[in-house]
Image (tube, rainbow, N blue to C red):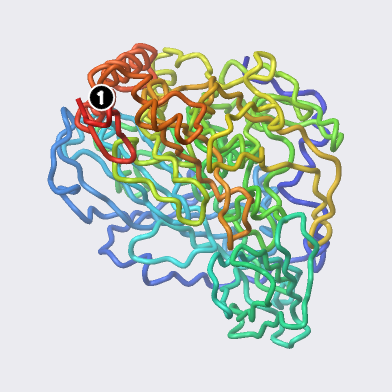
Amino acid sequence: MTPSPKPQRGDAVARAARPAEDPALREGGGAVPRRRFLPSPALFAAPVIVLLWAGAAPGQITRIDLPVVESPALGGESFGAAGRYERLRGVVTGEVDPDDPRHRDIVNLDRAPRNDRGRVEYRATVEIYRPVDMTRWNRAIYHTVPNRGGAGAAERALLERGFALVRVGWQGDIAPTDTNIVAELPVAALADGSPIVGAALEEMIFDDDASRSRYRLTYPTASREPSGGMLSVRATQTGRRQAPPDLAWTWVSDTEIEVVRPAGFDGGAIYEFIYQAKDPIVLGLGFAAMRDAISFLRYEAADAAGNPNPLAETGLPRTAISIGISQSGRMLRDFLYQGFNEDVAGRIVFDGIHPNIAGSRKTFTNYQFGQPGRWQKQHEDHVYPGDQFPFTYVTLTDPVSGRTDGLQERCAASGTCPKIVHSDSEAELWQARASLVVTDPAGGPIELPDNVRAYLFAGTQHGGGPGVHVGRPSAGLCQNLNNPLALAQIRTALSLALHDWVTKGVAPPESRFPTAGGGGLVPASAVDFPAIPGVTWSGSYNPLRLADHRSLPPMRGDAYTVLVGRTDADGNMVDGVRHPNLVAPIGTFTGWNLRREGFAEGAQCRGTGSFIPFAATRADRRASGDPRPSLEERYADHAAYVRAVGEAAEALVEDRLLLPEDADEIVSRARRNRDGTAGTVQQGAGAAP
């Protein structure tokens, strides 16, 4: 059921949104001098239509410059009943009241410059695709959280169904350009106007064999003296930090260093630079920018002068849903956790959200000297906040930290909890501790609230691949071929199911996430992975410990229980949503891969999964010693393989986990592909039937 507010919120109020461990947040209080906020020219590259907003209005968007910049867009193509689309792009300007209780946990907001009304201003890029003929609009906003400023592709399935596709900038540590989608956020300062200075940490993994490397820092240094920074190196996350004599660094500029890399460390070594940074950006304001822009688009028909909302031509939106993928999924979970699904008038912002491939993590955003782009993997970024309790959508008491909290605490208190579809790839079990979404911190089973569904895409890497019969996989820095198994089609079907849930009350498919109680989640040491010739199985995964970020690097406490998915005799995951190319496999598809020699060998290889093809024939299998049945032993001929893929695709369509058009494409690719390393289904001595 939807969580209800608790009489005593305790730790849920005084939580990491404003981390008490940063003493710089408590220094130099008092009034903040007003400063002029200068726009970046790139944000205003297009001609503008100016909409002025009355200060007394419920919303916080004070100005919107959002012209049509391309009509028709997308090559002039027509998309089903929705017809052709046009693209609008521009900037919203907003302001927040620092004294509003909803903003009390935005770090350093009290030190940001204020305008004549005592408000803190921001700007954000907005991009909208809407039908040229707005009578064909389905009256729904489909919002995509930008990933590191990237816009992402406009999905055909959404366009054909008449959605208005909206993207709003939120990340404030990225320089604006003519194409990216970012937020321009203020820099905090002390009461006398002097800069805020504090310790910041940058982790660097160069993944090459250069002897010298340059690295751009997120924040400028407060001092370019040699004593202004400290550099160490280690081979792995758990390795000893060292400063060998031939490790050196120099300042290139206030925001860049050059590292002379020492002998004895390979291309995957971890360099850690701690320095005195200045001028922290009020990054938490990016959550408010996204909140306010969507609230304006869905609730306000026009400004005080009568200039229209660009989505109000045929009536205001009836609903808004949001998807965040990878970094953006972590942002969406953080957005919910920090209470931003309630606007300043107490209204719900998103009726539904779809965090995808986020695992159990949030973001390192609403912190002094935050770095939103960081994402904790087995080999990378363990020193940053954003991966600590709470992990799931139900309120729990954490036996490790002693805290009681949950991602929906604040929306439950304000009555603004959305419908939630949470989906992960298998890689998120290995790299993002995704099991903690459906277990308690000790690994025990939990029951998700009624407003939440969770799905695990078995056999997929982070983000999925291009498709089993698309191109030829390569290994790159990894030991095994990269995993081509796709997940995007199933993700799209779930987003549409979320929309039906919100607008029609039609519940989406039941959760398909392996559980500890059902035996689908097990310790990595309990996975019975087959002994495949030439493949290293180590059970490596990304562990998690309680972290105390009052020190840099943080001190570590007790461990949480992180589980992974059980597998069959082929090494393929058994539970979750299984793609037709996993139900009828041509190899082993995993969510894990390992780094190769010269690049931190044996560590997990980023978010990449493995593809380990089956032998073509029985003779080939026996000659190599592969314990997995060959293609010849699995499928009588190519037609039998295509039938198996088709039956699996049909079952997913019936369960509303795959759209019919995507099922047809999957089967068509299987039918067309009769050779190639990513799709060989052979017969006899290797001749395609």
In percent of width and height, residue 334 lies at: 61, 42
Q: Is residue 204 visible?
A: yes
Residue closest to the eye, 272 or 197? 272
In the displayed structure, does residue 427 sit left or right of residue 467? right
Question: Camera-side residue: 215 or 411?
Answer: 215
Q: Quadrant of residue 120?
A: bottom right
Q: Is residue 21 above or below residue 84?
A: below
Height in image: 35 above or below 336? Answer: below
x then y, percent, for residue 471? 29, 45
Q: Quadrant of the C terminus?
A: top left
Q: Is residue 178 left or right of residue 131?
A: right
Disc 1: CA contacts within 10 A as few (<14), some (14-19) or many (>=20): many
What residue is shown at x 86% (from left), y 45% (from top)? 557
Q: Is residue 343 visible?
A: no
What amino acid is found at the position of numbered circle 1 in the picture? Val
Q: Is residue 655 left or right of residue 9?
A: left
Image coordinates of residue 672 in percent, x first then y, are 19, 31
Q: Which residue is mark 1?
A: 667
Q: Nearer the viewer, residue 248 or 9?
A: 248
Name the residue at 20% across, 35% down.
134
Q: Which of the two residues, 485 or 195, is positioned nearer the viewer here?
A: 485
How many badges with numbers are in the image?
Answer: 1
The image quarter containing residue 229 is: bottom right
Q: Is residue 335 left or right of residue 132?
A: right
Q: Position of residue 292 (x, y in %)?
A: 49, 45
Residue drawn at point x = 38 percent, y = 65 percent: 43
**In the structure shown, which secondary structural element does the residue marked by tag 1 occupy?**
helix
Quarter holding the N terminus is top right
